[in-house]
Image (cartoon, rainbow, N blue to C red):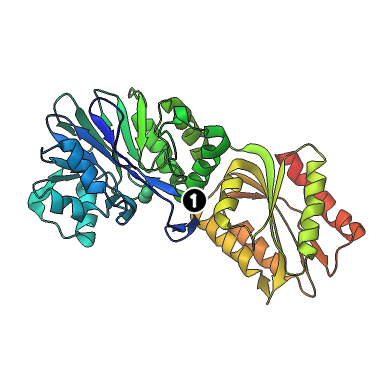
Amino acid sequence: MKEIRITDKIWYVGTNDRRKELFENNWPLPYGVSYNSYLINDTKSALIDTVEAGSCNDYIEKILRILNGKPLDYLVINHLEPDHASMITAVRAAFPQVKLVGNCQTFKILQHYYKTDEESFLLVKDGDKLELGESSLQFVLVPWVHWPETMVTYEASTQTLFSCDAFGGFGTLDGGIFDTNNDFEGFYLSEMRRYYSNIVGKYSNMVQKALAKLQGVPVKMIAPSHGLIWNNPEKVISLYDKWSRYEAEKGVVIAYASMYGNTAQMADYIGNLIGSRGIPVRTFDVSKTHASYLLNEIWKYSGLVLGTCAYNTKMHPMMEHLCNEIDLSQPKEKKVALFGTSTWNGAGVKCLKKFAEEYAGFELMPTVAETFGSVSPEKVDEAVAAMVEELVSKL
Ligand code: FEO
């Protein structure tokens, strides 16, 4: 992607990655991802984060073109995860005099990743400022959004917040790079919530702390490290506030694991019963739909129904995988019902129930619907009626 001037002194020098299959080698990227990096070209110059190594052939050339013979004075390291930091060595090679700007956590971690020398460090504390000319940077520490060293950088003259992972999303920037010239509702909203639920959601309490810290700061533009740049910051702030408070829409996600179709049949019976009340339902086979998308839907809706067949005295391994991803991502305040099928001793549902009872983010419905053998309307209607009533009354 060519460099793009976004204000008089701020340039977008990020890139799109459509080649990577899995973000963090776990989360599918069918629509790619962008690594956003910004260059402030004032009396002094500052690069805000880099991009993932290998994702951009001409990253250094873009910076050289904009600086046009001037040195690069600072590289601000808001976050050290390699999708933003793995070009640090290349930047230092191109601009040997550059000062690396970070907090004490940044430099602790940095030395485990890249060969650096302490003379190049410019250590900043929470609230410290760095004057570049007309532009003035202020650093705000927001630990655990999404690593312990993470900070955001505020540029006062344009009221721009370089927010790193916060307010980011999956999906490449295919045309315009701003929220105002893209189909947000039709495309980016879902990819952004998927990113939130997959990457940031576990740290929702820290997101709330970060939002509180930024309250009262005038922000005209939010420039994150992934996804759209926000000319309407209030919109993305309110979405992050909502997601990090676990505020969900009324609706139900049904996720099931089925070997021979009986648990799948039960899932549809349950879905039809809930849907007949006018409540939106989305149903997924966990062996087919990646947990990344399931977490997105789970974050969106207030209700969750999990179902499994029995498998070698446990729940189905793909349901176990989803339970593990739920535990890693920590969605909360979910109204949850369970169901399943088995052939002799019901071990699948027993294991699923144990997980659901121990997981703090679930309010579990007392009735667990379980059938043995093949599924028929008579068997299922009787088994699920009470469970559906309990769930619907809680949504
Ligand atoms: Fe986009 Fe936590 O890195």
Tell me where residue 323 appears, x and y as whole percent: 58, 60
Report the label total: 1
Q: Which residue lies most toward the bottom here?
A: 312
Give the residue displayed 79% in from the left and 51% down from the top. 270
Secondary structure of the residue carrying numbered label 1: helix
* Left/right of residue 184 with respect to residue 289 in the rendered view: left
Query: Three-letter amino acid code at disc 1?
Result: Asn
Q: Quadrant of the N terminus?
A: top left
312 in relation to 181, above or below: below
Q: Quadrant of the C terminus?
A: top right
Give the residue displayed 39% in from the left and 43% down from the top. 226
Residue 124 visible within the image: no
| Badge 1: residue crowd in 10 Å (few <14, some 14–19, many ≥20) | many
Tell me where residue 104 appears, x and y as whole percent: 20, 48
- Cβ(mark 1) to ligand 1 < 8 Å? no
348 in relation to 281, above or below: below
Tell me where residue 154 appears, x and y as whole percent: 27, 31
133 and 241: which one is in front? 133
73 in relation to 375, above or below: above
* Left/right of residue 372 with respect to residue 226 in the rendered view: right
Give the residue displayed 42% in from the left and 36% down from the top. 228
Tell me where residue 278 appears, x and y as whole percent: 78, 36
30 in relation to 373, above or below: above
12 and 247: which one is in front? 12
Give the residue displayed 31% in from the left and 55% down from the top. 82
The residue labelled by disc 1 is 198
Residue 314 visible within the image: yes
